[in-house]
Amino acid sequence: MVEQTQTRKVYDRELDFPLQGQIHDVVLEDSSVYDNYALEVYVDRAYDITIQRNMIYKTGNPIYFRGVGPSIGIAIADEPYLSYPAGHDRKIINNFLYGNGQNFAYWNTGLATGTSLNNDLIAGNTFIHSTNTNISITGGANHVNTRIENNIFKSSSGTLQNVDQKPGLVFSNNCWYSAVTGVASNGNDVIGDPLLVGGTFGPNYFKLQTHSPCIAKGKNNVTDVSEDYYKNARNNPPSIGGYEHPTVLVDNSDSTKVTKTGTWTASSFSPQKYGTDYLHDGNAGKGAMSVTFTPTIVNPNTYDVYMWWNADTNRANNVPVTVNHAGGTTSTTVNQQANGGQWNFIGSYTFHAGTLGNVVISNTSTSGFVIADAVKFVAH
Ligand SMILES: [Ca+2]
């Protein structure tokens, strides 16, 4: 196997990163590719290709336009003038794309027949402000085993998607700036503004704000996408897009970070559980039982604290929650008869480095079952 890794900064060329012909086992990573005329990255009859952690964008300077507008960011095709077999197994992950005519395009209209997307993965990318169509998949035969998941598609002009209604494409857990229909739509999508940090253009532009709806809403695909653009480990579930928002998650199953007082029972009964199971107090021992979730804080910072529980009418509606943080102790109550199966915002608090802070869930003065399932700390 021949593996080539290319890391470059390229611009003002006819075409860059042409991966054409029977080229294979090439990794294209950590590059800055912009303002090339024909298109930025072209994968044509190539196979076993990985394109990851690249910034692929246009500055908007019209001297680099192709015709009336910017060229394509990443394109896959099987051109007929090449007699090689069709391409397959192309992995496009953790890239940031901005301002291309089409940020991603597969096309075969008028090109070779019988070719398709085949065992390809397009995951964990952030596709922003295409001028024409954000993702376009047209022509070719029926596709084969190709996943398009955990990507952000945001455009304020043009269209978000133009995807042929053919089998073999599985879209899931993508964030669309506005609702889409057809094969591109999936029940686990996030619809709306991904709330990027923005500001000065660069990799940090693509980070997620603390309140982004894309945090922890991706499909768990850690076996395929274990890190993000910054090579930080992906959470489970991951953030949607190329950036994994730094989050410290403590699940009841983590015995090194969870301390129980009293006899709590583990259960996996509720489909709203987080992880494999959760703890409940058996609706007993009121006032004598608590569970403490202690995060290991590496970076002292302000964190948004969220709790996850599973809801039912037999739950307590006044569960005491105490947050011990750098500024003192703050107590509140949560209603576990509602808002189950989701992250519920508790408040924003500053935490010192280490294990000084924690969240305590108790059953004092409650009636009904008290649930201790998972707590999440999302850095500002
Ligand atoms: Ca749990």
Image (cartoon, rainbow, N blue to C red):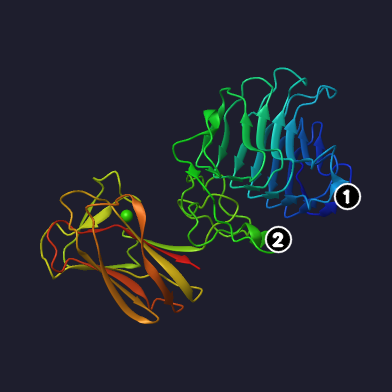
Q: CA distance from mark 2 to mark 1?
A: 18 Å
Disc 2 CB within 8 Å of nearest ligand 1 atom = no
**Which disc number belongs to residue 202?**
2
Between residue 297 and residue 365, name the one nearer to us: 365
Give x and y (percent) for residue 332. 26, 70
Residue 244 found in image quarter: bottom right
Q: Name the residue rendered at 76%, 24% in the picture.
A: 85
N-terminal of the pair, mark 2 or mark 1, is: 1
Q: Amino acid at mark 1?
A: Asp
- Tell me if mark 2 has few (under 14), some (14-19) or many (20+) residues whose alpha carbon lies within 10 angstroms of its own: few
Q: Residue furthest toward the top?
A: 113
Q: Quadrant of the N terminus?
A: top right
Which quadrant does ligand 1 occupy? Answer: bottom left
- Tell me if mark 1 has few (under 14), some (14-19) or many (20+) residues whose alpha carbon lies within 10 angstroms of its own: few
Residue at numbered disc 1: 12
Q: What kind of element bears circle 2?
A: loop
Q: Amino acid at mark 2?
A: Gly
Residue 24 found in image quarter: top right
296 above or below 174?
Answer: below
Q: What kind of element bears circle 1?
A: loop
Q: Name the residue rendered at 50%, 51% in the picture.
A: 214
